[in-house]
Image (spheres, rainbow, N blue to C red):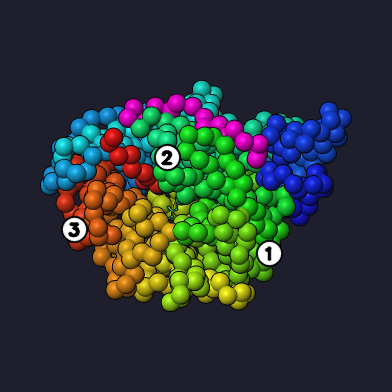
Amino acid sequence: MDSLWFSDICGHHVSPFTMLDFDQSCHRKHGFSLENKLVFARKLYKQALTIARVVSPSQLAIVPSPDKEPVDPDQNHVAWTSVKQERWEGELVVQGEIPLWLKGTYLRNGPGLWHIEDYNFRHLFDGYATLVKLHFEDGRLIAGHRQIESEAYKAAKKNKKICFREFSEVPKHENFMAYVGDLSKLLSGSSLTDNANTGVVKLGDGRVVCLTETQKGSLVIDPNSLETLGRFEYSDSLGGLIHSAHPIVTDAEFLTLLPDLLKPGYLVVRMEPGTNERKVIGRVNCSGGPAPGWVHSFPVTQHYVVVPEMPLRYCAQNLLRAEPTPLYKFQWHPQSKAFLHVMCKASGKVVTSVEVPLFVTFHFINAYEEEDEDGRVTSIIADCCEHHADTSILDQLRLKNLRFFKGEDVLPDARVGRFKIPLDGSRNGKLEAALDADEHGRGMDMCSINPAYLGKKYRYAYACGAQRPCHFPNTLTKLDFVEKKAKNWYDEGAVPSEPFFVARPGATEEDDGVVISLISEKNGGGYALLLDGSTFKEIARAKLPYGLPYGLHGCWVPKK
Ligand SMILES: CC1=C[C@H](O/C=C(C)\C=C\C2=C(C)CCCC2(C)C)OC1=O
Ligand SMILES: CC(/C=C/C=O)=C\C=C/O
Ligand SMILES: [Fe+2]
């Protein structure tokens, strides 16, 4: 059903646009006549009406209604509470020693504002983006935070209601016709959010861009003032509405995946520093399923891009709903199986597609090539934070579940899933735990590595693990894939964010550097924490004036 809605709109699939985007679609690129465009528009409108018919009236909220979930302020951990104010900046008092070599700014993005007026959002991923900075220089630390001024955020503030479609929240419609109008806006992408609340990357040319799952939610910011400078406009004509929220970004390139919901598959694209133009490396067709698997992230090796095809797949039907479904914009299709595709970066050729055991992951950690004694690549190893093929983690991240922790051990188990992809033409790949998950309390997500080891054989990763009982990953963990051991950091009641590794300039050891994390404390406070990358012992901490909401992903902007 999902793909049927779109399949007959446009007969050819030469252009890799993902959904239906008038301005940038293949229709413009291939010079379609006005008449054809009108035929196309009519088809679109008819499809919107068909969709409107299959969405039952109960899924239409006619009157705006606040989320009626009970809110008990005593239970509200600062990690899950909206940021206190629009912005703040100041120097922090440092306990311990910040290494003098640490010069630059750590930026962390995340969904920090979960209400508009008295309407409370439901899911962690719905929040309006809060950008945090920690600027280290001469052993001192200047911190700050500021809201990202996306169109979605500004419109919500001005109109005192949600105006764009967020991860799970949808603007409420006054009546049925307004809903049908919104559906056509959805098909053109104009109703989708640009709330860039997921990650932040420094491009090779120095521009700093905040990102989310929607392409329009790529916003350029100033890493010093945290001011939103404007939209990052992709100047190519690839079109489409969504991309992977985690591009692979180095000083030399920006690689990402554009899922194609019309003809299930993915485009692998590359953008050079100093340009806004993505160029196609190649295309992968899906091996299963009515739609591509969700690609929140993907891994690369030195010569290959690994394109994951999870059985948790995008679902056009769920995209159009007015109320969230248990799996939000996705659907679980175990019968469609799971695959990993390997594309050669240089030629764009798919060198293998293997079936793998079912899996669920948000985050790939790293990947590398294994060689035989003659230096021929025999297989690829790809590691991820794997949730035992169980989608319930998405539900666990509802704010209601995060806010009401009564001490039960409800965090679903996760592990470091290690895929082995043979390159000898075999049709199946393997998936096993890279180390005993009890080493990290069977919690596993929000990972980082030493960026010098991207795509190469590596030994260490940093992530959030669990000290049970818990309902959310609550430790920082250093994983050693050689010893198959983990070192864990824990502070009772604290919610730590993604441990981010910064290498010491000139280091020769993989773990020679520091790990930065922002901690939200159970008493409403918060602090910036520095751990030694090798010993994983605390080397410094600095208290913030107030605790900040939980955040997702970060990047490092070194001082020039
Ligand atoms: C994880 C994670 C989710 C969050 O994503 C935010 C948005 C707006 C996602 C939107 C969508 C999908 C997840 C699937 C396809 C459709 C679309 C609506 C674009 O940020 C995160 O980190
Ligand atoms: C917070 C999280 C995923 C974030 C996606 O970007 C997962 C946490 C639990 O495993
Ligand atoms: Fe992520």
Kindly report the distance in space between the C-alpha atoms of the residues bearing marks 1 and 2. Answer: 36 Å
Quadrant containing the N terminus is: bottom right
Give the label on residue 537, or none.
Answer: 3
**Magenta segment, prevailing SS (helix, strand or loop):** loop
Q: Is residue 526 visible?
A: yes
The kind of residue on which mark 2 rests is Gly
Q: Is mark 1 within 8 Å of ligand 1?
A: no
**Residue 395 x/y as whole percent:** 51, 56
Tag 1 secondary structure: loop
Q: Where 341 falls versus 504 (above or below)?
A: below
- Identify which residue is drawn at 63% across, 59% down: 349
Q: Residue at x 76, y 48 (%)?
A: 13
| Amino acid at pointer 1 | Gly
Dot 2 crowding, Cα within 10 Å, few <14, some 14–19, many 20+: some
Which residue in the protein does label 1 denote? 288
Q: Amino acid at mark 3?
A: Lys
Which residue was labeled with disc 2?
A: 204
Q: Residues within 10 Å of mark 1 (few under 14, many from 20)?
A: many
Q: CA distance from mark 1 to mark 3?
A: 46 Å
Identified at 68% across, 58% down, the residue is: 285
Please state which of the two labelled residues, at mark 1 or mark 2, is closer to the viewer. Answer: 2
N-term-proximal mark, 1 vs 2: 2
Left or right of 31 on screen, residue 66: left
